Image (spheres, coloured by chain):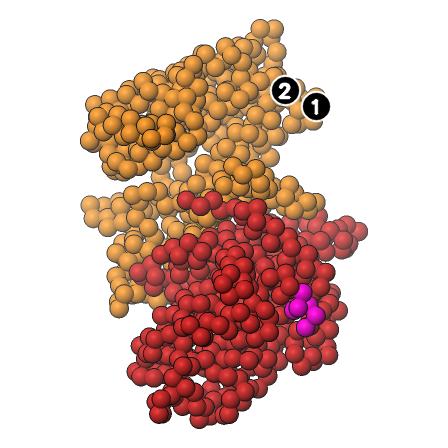
Chain colours: A orange, B red
Amino acid sequence: MTDLDTFRQETRAWLEENCPQSMRSPFGSEKEVCWGGRNFKFYSEDQRLWLERMAEKGWTAPDWPTEYGGGGLSRAEHKILLEEMARIQARPPLNSFGIWMIGPAILKFGSEALKQQHLPPIVRGEIRWCQGYSEPGAGSDLAGLQTKAEDRGDHFIVNGQKIWTSYADRADWMFALVRTNPDVKKQEGISLVLFDMETPGVSTRPIKLISGESPFCETFLDDVRVEKDQVVGEVDKGWTIAKYLLTHERSMIGNMGSTAAGQKTLPQLAASAVGLQDGKLADTMLRAEVASWTIDSIGYELTAERARDEAKAGQGVGNVSAMLKYAGTELNKRRYELLVAAYGSEGLIWEGDSRPAGALPQQWLRTKGNSIEGGTSEVQLNIIAKNILGLG
Amino acid sequence: MQKLVLTEEQQMLKDAAQGLFSDQAPVSQLRKLRDEKDPLGYVPEFWNQAVELGLAGTLIPEAYGGSEFGHVGMGQVMEEGGRTLAASPLFASGVLGACALMLAGHGSQKDILKDIAAGTHLMALAIDETGRHQPARVATKAEAQGDGFVLNGNKTFVVDGHIANTLIVSARTSGGERDEQGITLFLVDANAEGVSVERTIFPDGRNYAKVELQNVAVGADAVLGPKDQGYESLQKVLDIGNAHLAAELLGLSSEAFERTVAYMKERKQFGVYISSFQALQHRAAHMWSELEQVKSMVLKALMALDASDDQASLLVSAAKAKASQVAELVTNEGVQLHGGMGMTDEFDIGLFMKRARPVQLLLGDFRYHADRVATLKGF
């Protein structure tokens, strides 16, 4: 038996013993998702226990080094862990911008002290992070950001406004891009800084979206003190890290093109909504559109797979994340348009005791943001045109 | 799971094919064949070189003189051939003919494979009877007579029909006009009495024929595969054919796209290169993104055929559908972005559009395969 076989056996046994039964099914609703943080309220004791046990093993961040609380798993072991979790439908124990975004950036660019300070609490789900990138005047032109950080010797004083900060009202710390030098080319005067959301001068206000939900906030920064040791990487060199994080974010959002395991597929949902006649969707035009979507969805899945395989083999073009983000988010928007069409008026019931399609109206509207957040589809096309096709 | 990348050997075959096509069968060769209304429709010297390189036997077992290199390998050849619009009997004989014999042929019928690999025996698949592909719709009749059969009917859109030595004909031995049951495949000598072949000219300058069968007598040994059950092996041959047509579409679309991008970088209007216009950049970026999807789907479909994956039919139909859709997009945009030059015969870009449409239609277009995807997915 190889080491990996042993690892699989041990992992399977550990999961069997430690994953509570109620954590072995797809999330029923948003409140069942664990985000951690100082003020997080677990919806059940099992949810708390599951996080605690996984964090203990470092398996909330399976591929991070053990010295910072991570699981220290190799790529192959990580894959096995995910497969074994999928086997019993184990939920992710923690959703976290710390694990997905700022953690990897600190690991790659941060000082030893920053790693020691921030990574272990992220692994344990004790500190919840939010991202301070966009500003009212800096959306697609992110490098045009104006939030300024003035040098006061051992610290900075930060003033400005951030927008589209996900769950800023529930986050404990923010990683933010700020302008530390206004006199150079815009990309060359930006730094990535970290601060506690309880620091005086930080305030947030939720933004109500067309879906009626408020996953994003405006964040106001008035004379906020940020210690100099909380700069990730070098001062004025934050744009490189920002780009790294944006690429990371693009691939995450691009994943939305995929139908998650356990989720019903579009053809299945359409069939339950309009019914089958002689084995075919009862509405022929809808059937044609769902078929066309299915073909594109197969293409998207295979392209994501090929991009991973090529990266491992050291082949392929870079910047594929821009293409996958573009294709994946457009696909997800089409999926929801077709779902609304399939359910017809039943799919648009916003409120009421009888909602055959559940929260579909809200979800449908939320997808409209997919091709805007993390770089609009137009920005992705710009990246492809300039960086891959050399058009200019 | 197999990685979605080429092996070193497959990449080498691709490179070799690319070298052969660009040196020995560039776009100018097709142009010449078309202008001269060449009776063969391909250049024998080029075909001999392709055969020498082993391309005709790419799919054929070593015992019959082939290299048994598999569908991923042959797909690379088809893709590279698509880039130069190379005209040759490779698809009709090396893919359709060879696979029909390999899948359904018995002992002596399989001996033809040796001559196919040697490039000396040409095949053509005669199945369509209407403008739109519907392989189960077979009105051509095969009636038992003595030990053999007598065939009557009309076939259309027969690739390389006018140069083929042997035709593979679908004919009805029982059942109604649209039944999958009751279809039998026959090997018919193209020179047999009662067979008349009319060459038809298509926009791509390639060879398709109308075939009329009038009281064509064949022996019992002409039956290819089981009687009445020919549809099953035909479907397998069509899956294979469609995967390779998708590969050709990928090649011709990629070439048309690259030529268009190159043109955008040299054409000036308003004092600047038109590549500086964002409206055009986004159209190019979208096409690139679409082509990347086609590339993944074609490779996966070819791999699925090699692995006899039970998802192969689904993956092939998805690939052919998408490749057809994207070929239409890219060749239309190619002409549009070349502006007035795109409308001239002198520029090559129009040739890619004229090749794309017949390939899209051949063995089923986007609509045919989208319908099949839905059926295979159970909706």
Q: Tag 2: residue type? A: Asp
Numbered circles on residues, count:
2
Q: Residues within 10 Å of mark 1 (few under 14, many from 20)?
A: few
Q: Which mark is residue A236?
A: 2
Whether residue A146 appears in this view of the structure is no
Whether residue B39 appears in this view of the structure is yes
Q: Residues within 10 Å of mark 2 (few under 14, many from 20)?
A: many
Task: Report the residue at 53% width, 75% height from top.
Answer: B123
Task: Report the residue at 60% width, 61% height from top.
Answer: B54
Residue at numbered disc 1: A184
Which residue is more in the foreground, A8 or B192? B192
Over which residues does the magenta segment extend?
B44-49
Q: Earlier in the sequence, mark 1 or mark 2?
A: 1
Q: Tag 1: residue type? A: Val
Indicate whether B360 appears above or below B207. Answer: above
Task: Report the residue at 47% width, 86% height from top.
Answer: B154
Marks 1/2 in contact by CB < 8 Å: the verdict is: yes
